[in-house]
Image (tube, rainbow, N blue to C red):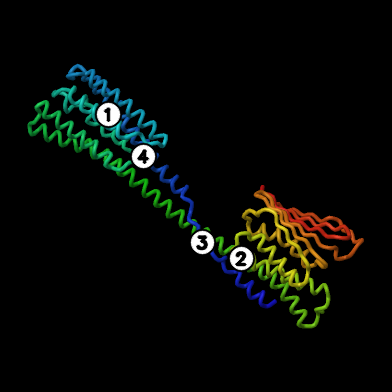
Amino acid sequence: MSADLDTAAAAVVPPRGAARARPDGGPVVDVGRASDQGARIAAVAIAGVWHVAIGLPALLGARADLAAPAVVAGGWLVTAAVGGYAGARLLRGARPPALPLVVLLLVVDAAVFAAAGPQQLFTAANWVWGTLGWFFVVVAWGRRIRWLLVPLAGHSLIALAALLGHGATAPADLTRYAMYVYGTSSLPVAVFAGAAVIATLARGRADAAAAALAVAAEREAAERARQERRARLALAGGAAGTVLAELADGRADPADPLVQRRCVLAAARLRRLIAESDDVPDPLLHELRAAVDLAERNGLPIEMVAVGTPPPLPVEVRRRLVDPPTAALAEASGWARLTVVAGPDEVAVSLVTPEVAGPGAVGAPVAADDGQVEHTDERDGEIRWTQTRWRRT
């Protein structure tokens, strides 16, 4: 019995093989998506508002001064259609096909620069200067930054070719060109890169917070399990210690069947507590086999039948399933039959033993339900039937 107490004390240590579970990445991904979604909405809104509120009025106001106003207006409509399609996909969480849309926008870019004419080259009527960079941002969203830099570089080369074609090669024109390229490219690049950095930082912080919460939860669960096992050990050890003290003082007779049952019950509780901490595939069956093993060592013929595989169950549920049959088994004599029937949503543990009081001792059925496990104990004068049942709710 003292060896059992020493072994049970070791059960306070967490089970072997308990690995630290990594926090689920779902919340981390959600945080990153939420941060990125806000930036997507901002990018689509900037492109749309700039195209409609700035580009369209300038185009309509200067249409008579354009070299080919129909081409400039047609390019505006094509760009609006591309932006609407890409923006709708982006807001739904899907990336638009970047390559064909970038090529189409660059074709529109070249056509508008050619159709604007030399007089409108640096005016708002040549709307591709300020608008096209934002549409490149929408089309290239979610990809590497080169998907934005290459179209912007192409846009700059097209603008330079238009300057040379229109003969705008004076130092003032080239300086204005450099200012336009810088002014219309730097902000889209900053928004594109900044949104990616913010989303990455948000995911990193969420990942760190989730990891910290997981460690705190594991620590709290381990402490709670340790305190619970100590309480169970104190309860089981107290019962065993009482019996041992009575035997040592001569107040209990080792030949007394009642004292023997008390010893068996205390030993069964200790063994079940020890088995509870073992790292095994089927903890419930392992704990029941520990009780069966003790009964067999005490000379009780017992048959154990298991049908099905028990699902993973919390420790408290397993205790409530095992404790009543274990207590009944400690009082059994003659023979015993333990049956475990398990399924994904239900587990039943039944023990049949001869009635200790003998034939004619009929007792009213005892039933209890604590909301998790049902316990039934029936006697008909010849046999005693004890059952515990758990159902998934």
Q: Dot 1, how many residues are within 10 Å of its Cα: few (below 14), some (14-19), or many (20+)?
A: few
Q: Nearer the viewer, mark 2 or mark 4?
A: 2
Residue underneath mark 3: 19
| Callout 1 secondary element | helix
Q: For the residue labelled by badge 3, is the local secondary structure a helix, a strand or a loop?
A: loop
| Among numbered discs 4 and 1, the one appearing first in the sequence | 4
Question: Residue 234: x and y, percent?
Answer: 67, 71
Q: Is residue 185 visible?
A: yes
Separation of residues labelled 2 and 3 (CA atoms): 14 Å
Instruction: Say which residue appears at 72% left-offset and 76% top-offset.
Output: 241
**Most foreground residue, 15 or 33:** 15
For badge 2, the amino acid type reads Ser
Quarter of the rendering containing residue 96: top left
Q: What's under tag 1, amino acid-wise?
A: Leu
Foreground of the two, 246 or 354: 354
Identity of the amino acid at label 4? Answer: Ala
Spatial separation of the CA atoms under disc 1 and disc 3: 54 Å
Distance (Cα) linking label 2 and label 1? 66 Å
Is label 2 in contact with label 3 (beta carbons under 8 Å)?
Answer: no
Where residue 304 sits in the image (x, y, percent)?
Answer: 73, 61
**Left or right: where 216 falls relative to 228:** left
Residue 134 horizontal side relative to residue 248, left or right? left
Residue under pointer 2: 277
The residue positioned 77% from the left and 61% from the top of the image is: 337
**C-alpha gap between disc 2 and disc 4:** 50 Å
Nearer-N-terminus badge (2/1): 1
- Sequence-wise first label, 1 or 3: 3
Closer to us: 359 or 175: 359
x and y percentages locating residue 279 in the rendered image = 59, 64
Give me the C-alpha separation between circle 3 and circle 4.
38 Å
Identity, as a three-letter code, of the amino acid under mark 3: Ala
